[in-house]
Image (tube, grey):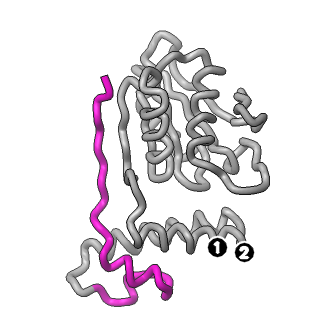
């Protein structure tokens, strides 16, 4: 299993599937999720594309250094993976936090990005998202990243139901009862977009 070494010495685990001659696609996962979450997409693309999926620092088999994690450093981690795999440029797909990381990759290294696909992400955090991320940070600090994954899944399931429910939403559709719940009522619908860089 290959590991790339980031600029600060952190080892970043990744996996490549597909033929070397095929165009590369880099998959960047969201908060706390590991590369294996992309397995179905990667299997579907493997005959026509060369797929690269990484475990962000702090997730999966990558190193888990103490302290805070910076999205710009995580973007550099992805570049280190491309370098280690011998890939000059790739189509980049980012989900959630991985979408934010992918946007940073595109801005700081535009020559490395053939196209950018952003799934369920944003280019800035709205108030509701700040509250949500802070609540997840609190859960991570007290219960660990596994609990954050369960919270995120619970949150996503309830918001799919909430988006289908008539307004105003009953409090039972909003998951945890905290300051985040008030903001979920203002939550915009899911956004997915694909933008050609070149």
Quickly name the residue at label 1.
Answer: 139
Where, quadrant-wise, is the N terminus in this rendering? top right
The mark found on residue 65 in the picture is none
Q: How crowded is mark 1: few (under 14 residues within 10 Å), some or many (20 or more)?
A: some
Q: Is residue 70 magenta?
A: no
Please give left or right for residue 172 compared with residue 26 in the image.
left
Q: Are marks 2 and 1 in contact (CB under 8 Å)?
A: yes
Residue 115 location in percent, x, y?
35, 28
Residue 157 vs 25, above or below: the answer is below
Instruction: Please tell me in which quadrant of the rendered image residue 118 appears.
Output: top left
Looking at this view, is 150 or 143 the one in front? 143
Where, quadrant-wise, is the C terminus in this rendering? top left
Looking at this view, is 163 or 87 the one in front? 87
Q: Does the magenta stretch include residue 181?
A: yes
- Residue in the picture at 44% in, 67% down: 129
Label 1 SS: helix
Label 2 SS: helix
- Residue in the picture at 70% in, 50% down: 58
Residue 32 location in percent, x, y?
61, 55
- Residue in the picture at 32% in, 89% down: 170
Q: Residues within 10 Å of mark 2 (few under 14, many from 20)?
A: few
Residue 21 location in percent, x, y?
47, 10
Instruction: Please tell me in which quadrant of the rendered image residue 136 appears.
Output: bottom right
Q: Residue furthest left?
A: 166
Give the CA distance from mark 2 to mark 1. 5 Å
Looking at this view, is 123 or 115 the one in front? 123
- Residue in the picture at 40% in, 74% down: 158
Quickly name the residue at label 2.
Answer: 142
Residue 107 vs 154, above or below: the answer is above
What residue range appears in magenta?
Answer: 169-198
């Amino acid at each position: 299993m290959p590991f790339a070494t980031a600029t600060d010495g952190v080892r970043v685990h990744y996996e490549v599937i597909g033929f070397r001659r095929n165009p590369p696609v880099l998959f960047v996962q969201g908060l706390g999720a590991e590369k294996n979450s992309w397995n179905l997409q990667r299997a579907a693309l493997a005959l026509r594309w060369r797929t690269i999926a990484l475990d962000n620092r702090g997730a999966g088999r990558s190193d888990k250094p103490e302290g805070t994690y910076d999205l710009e450093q995580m973007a550099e981690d992805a570049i280190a993976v491309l370098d280690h795999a011998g890939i000059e440029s790739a189509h980049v797909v980012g989900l959630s936090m991985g979408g934010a990381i992918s946007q940073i990759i595109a801005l700081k290294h535009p020559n490395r990005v053939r196209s950018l696909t952003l799934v369920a992400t944003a280019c800035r955090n709205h108030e509701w998202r700040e509250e949500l991320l802070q609540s997840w940070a609190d859960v991570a600090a007290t219960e660990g990243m596994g609990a954050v994954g369960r919270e995120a899944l619970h949150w996503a399931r309830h918001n799919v139901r909430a988006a289908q429910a008539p307004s105003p939403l009953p409090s039972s559709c909003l998951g945890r009862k905290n300051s985040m719940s008030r903001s979920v009522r203002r939550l915009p619908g899911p956004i997915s977009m694909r933008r050609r860089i070149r």
